[in-house]
Image (cartoon, rainbow, N blue to C red):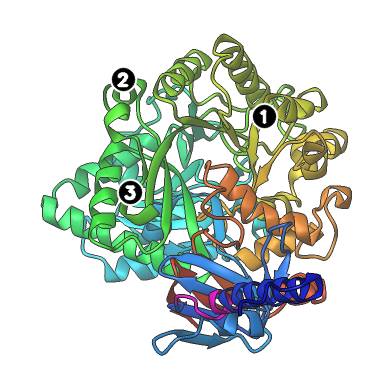
Amino acid sequence: MFHWPGRGEAILFGTVKHLSTLFILLTVACLQRTVVEPATLVLRNGKIVTVDDAKPEAQAMAIKGDRITALGSNDDIQRYVGPETKVIDLAGQTAIPGLIESHGHFMRLGQTKTMLDLMDVKDWSEIVSMVEAAAKQATPGEWILGNGWHQEKWASVPKPNVEGFPFHDELSKVSPDNPVILSHASGHASFVNARAMAAAGLTSKTPDPAGGEILKDATGRPIGLLRETASALVNRALEDWRAKKTPEERLADARRQIELAVKASLENGVTSFHDAGANFATVDVYKQAAADGLLGIRLWVMIRDSNDNLRAKLAQYKAVGLNENHLTIAAIKVTADGALGSRGALMLEPYADSPSSSGLATVPLESIAETAKIAIDNGVQLCVHCIGDRANREVLNVYERTFKQNAAQKDLRWRIEHAQHLDAADIPRFGQLGVIAAMQGIHATSDAPYVPARLGPARAEEGAYVWQKLMKTGAIIANGTDVPVERIDPMANFHATITRKTKDGSVFYGDQKMTRAEALKSYTWNGAYAAKEESLKGSLAAGKLADITVLSKDIMTVPEDEIPSTMVVYTIVGGKVVYTR
């Protein structure tokens, strides 16, 4: 006999049914939580600083291929460990997003590894001795190259001199059979010997080129110092000598420079590099290197070439994320003025320590405006080197006019490279116009000893390396070292950014220093934003590229003076450990 359940029995039956459904759902949820695709790499037991507001810190991270899968506690990430997973115990060490060198010179970095390193010389006589030793090893006619000297950092002023620069006679005496070019640390001047000037046909009658200067003594004789575009007079003779090599030899040299630059970057925890100026021929070398797997970091390239070449070639060269996001060509580089150290920065008022000079415009303003139109037409970013306050103002004017004329185009993210010395009236314009300031923390402390002399104290305090003033306008500051102008040393740069301490311990306008969080962001997310790549990199979050730098110390908490001794323990690019200390 069939029995229809009563009310109480029906409720009990329904409850059991719902509980069964709930049990099944919970079981499925648990299975989904425990059954995940194994990671290829897991970092655990560390302090992971993500630069991601949604999850500022984590203890462990899972990576699958070249992307981050998950972040959390050791227990959270343990389920991603499979039989083939590589597990790295960070042992309490700090992991941060892969560092982004937001303004450097990639091929020059490689080249300087094959030159005389003059960055730490104490005086002119030490340079002469180094060249003398190199000349004894060189074959007659072979060019001797050096990089990194800065007269303001010498212990003594050479005698005789013009503006603190020595005469070439001592140098020429020890290198009579070898042309010599010694590049200034700024990259905006060169010192050459008599043999190099002879190779270039440079004499007392040679006129100054546009945007450059051949420094001469009271009699009109060149002393050996070539400022700004004048360096090209001798560089052309160097290129003529190099041209005698076979195409295969020249290509081998270029690829070797790439290898050396990649090695130096990875050893310093740099996973992405904004190359501040490469011509189309160099980009061809980059493309082949990337295709061959030689480009071990991510390179974002600013094309520096003539406007005619840009118009003819840029459209076919523009590319984003080639070879698994290792090469992007999406910007143009122009140099509007020189450097402060060589008094080439273009200023609104004369130099305080050289009243006859206000610096040099290295490219006509009309040409920069033409380049701006090319950038707009091709949908690429424009990056203009501006150090002096006049150069910054004039380029901001070009940007503002271009933006108004092309109001329909949004999110352009045009940049000013360096933005070192600004007039107070122009500081707010960065935030108002959305112009990115690609600045270098280490330049502030490196230049500090002579900035007040060049500009005068009032002008220096008002507008020299004004990071906080710029950030208060809403401007994004992307950090870097301008290597090889400075060493590619992120810890020295980070320390300079948060302390603004010079070598003698004094602080250079300390109200403008960044906090540690601001400094780390300037070296990671801001660099990615400055290249329109923040969706891919710059912070550590699920779905982003697994570019990670592991440090021996926690730079967010250790005493300030311990930061420069912090070492890179691992550099990870795309989920692969590419450097281990």
Task: Specify the segment rendered in magenta.
Answer: 30-37
What residue sits right under mark 3 in the picture?
Answer: 322
Left or right placement of residue 309 versus residue 541 in this view: left
- Mark 3 or mark 1: which comes first in sequence? 3
Q: Is residue 123 above or below residue 443?
A: below
The residue lying at 46 percent from left, 49 percent from top is 168
Please report contact status of discs 2 and 1: CB closer than 8 Å, yes or no: no
Q: Is 449 in the magenta?
A: no
* Secondary-structure class at tag 1: loop
* Secondary-structure class at tag 2: helix
* Secondary-structure class at tag 3: helix
The residue lying at 29 percent from left, 35 percent from top is 317
What residue sits right under mark 1 in the picture?
Answer: 434
What residue sits right under mark 2 in the picture?
Answer: 308
Tell me residue 352's x, y (percent).
Answer: 77, 32
- Main secondary structure along the magenta-highlighted residues: helix
Q: Amino acid at mark 2?
A: Asp
Tell me residue 396's x, y (percent).
Answer: 64, 22
Q: Quadrant of residue 60?
A: bottom right
Gap in angstroms between the C-alphas marked 2 and 1: 28 Å
Gap in angstroms between the C-alphas marked 3 and 1: 27 Å
Local packing at callout 2 (Cα closer than 10 Å; few below 14, some 14-19, many 20+) is: few
Q: Amino acid at mark 1?
A: Gly
Q: Is 32 in the magenta?
A: yes
